[in-house]
Image (cartoon, helix red, strand yellow):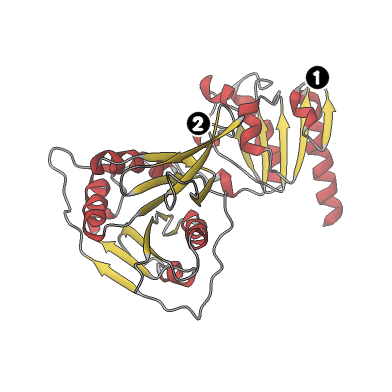
Amino acid sequence: MEQRHKILILAELCEGGVHKVAYELIGKALELYPSGKSVVECLILGNGEPDVAELCRRGAETVYYMKDPAFEEPEEQLYKENICAFIREHEPEIVLIGATSLGRSLGPRIAAALRTGLTADCTQLQISTEEKTAGKLEQIRPAFSDNILAHIVTGTMPQMATVRYKEFPEAVSDKSREVNIKVIKPYRTEVSGCRITRVYRELQENIQDAQVIVAGGRGIRKKEDLALLKELADLLGGQVGVSRALVDAGLAGSSMQVGYSGNRVKPALYIACGISGAPQHLAGMKESDVVIAVNTDPSAPIFSICDYGYVGDLYQILPQMIEDVKAWKGEEK
């Protein structure tokens, strides 16, 4: 019997459930090799009773749930040591990780410990057909602010990549699929020399899942003015985003950043306020369904990609937009 290519997906728990990026990775992993030529498995660390069976319904043949109170909160060093021990034992050819905050922190640690390579923030994956690299995982990621695509092949095993969230469609859930969950014990529950005693978590929704985003850039004068964006976002059932300039200025947290070095978003509606439209920012939001831009500079690049544009001061236009939405919602009632 021909040996099947083993692909391991490191799934992640988020707010008590499986992070959806794992479903995207399963879908992509199933496409890499012809049907029957690969086995897709998942490893997830945690505690409690999350619906890990959904990973099987999405296409994973086996889900290994490493369950222990030690994994109640994610601790990179402890996670890394257990994941590396699992990988050494099971020997997958390919390891895929979602490019979430945890994934971006864990990926390099695991790759360094296994003495293998890692390609970060991939936007495409395929099996190479080139003569010298045939059969290897070709990891594709944008470089130089999305101006070129780098094609990278790892010469060592396992071949590892972190993959951006919202890049691939989720694998379809099929309740007829066999559910094979193996609850396994951790290899270790403590790391010498360090221990988490308390975790502080900032409660904030995931901007990548937002269907409406009202984003501000250099046109925002001070932190308090973000309330104007939030008022409009709340009326539309959305969230507030920012450009890198506001994060660098200390006016907003990095979790709100949209762009090449921040979050990649695909909302139904993106309202860009005081954002010029630098390539780094456009790389993170250019796939939005509808883009509305507000800027004082009529030659700002954002106007070349927006669906509707307002040339003017956001401090005058946004209050009017807020009043218009309020009036519209009042008429709806």
Q: How many marks?
A: 2
Could you give the CA–CA distance between mark 2 and mark 1, rounded to whole angstroms?
A: 29 Å
Residue at 48%, 56% (x, y): give it: 25
Q: Position of residue 48 (x, y in %)?
A: 32, 64
Q: Is residue 250 above or below residue 320?
A: above
Residue at 55%, 24% (x, y): give it: 251
Q: Nearer the viewer, residue 230 or 276?
A: 276
Q: Nearer the viewer, mark 2 or mark 1?
A: 1
The type of residue carrying mark 2 is Gly
Q: Which mark is residue 65?
A: none
Q: Would residue 187 appear left or right of 245 to someone viewing this image?
A: left
Q: Which mark is residue 299?
A: 1
Q: Are marks 2 and 1 in contact (CB under 8 Å)?
A: no
Q: Helix, strand or loop at disc 2?
A: loop
Farthest-out residue, left: 192
Q: Which residue is mark 2?
A: 253
Q: Position of residue 6 (x, y in %)?
A: 36, 61
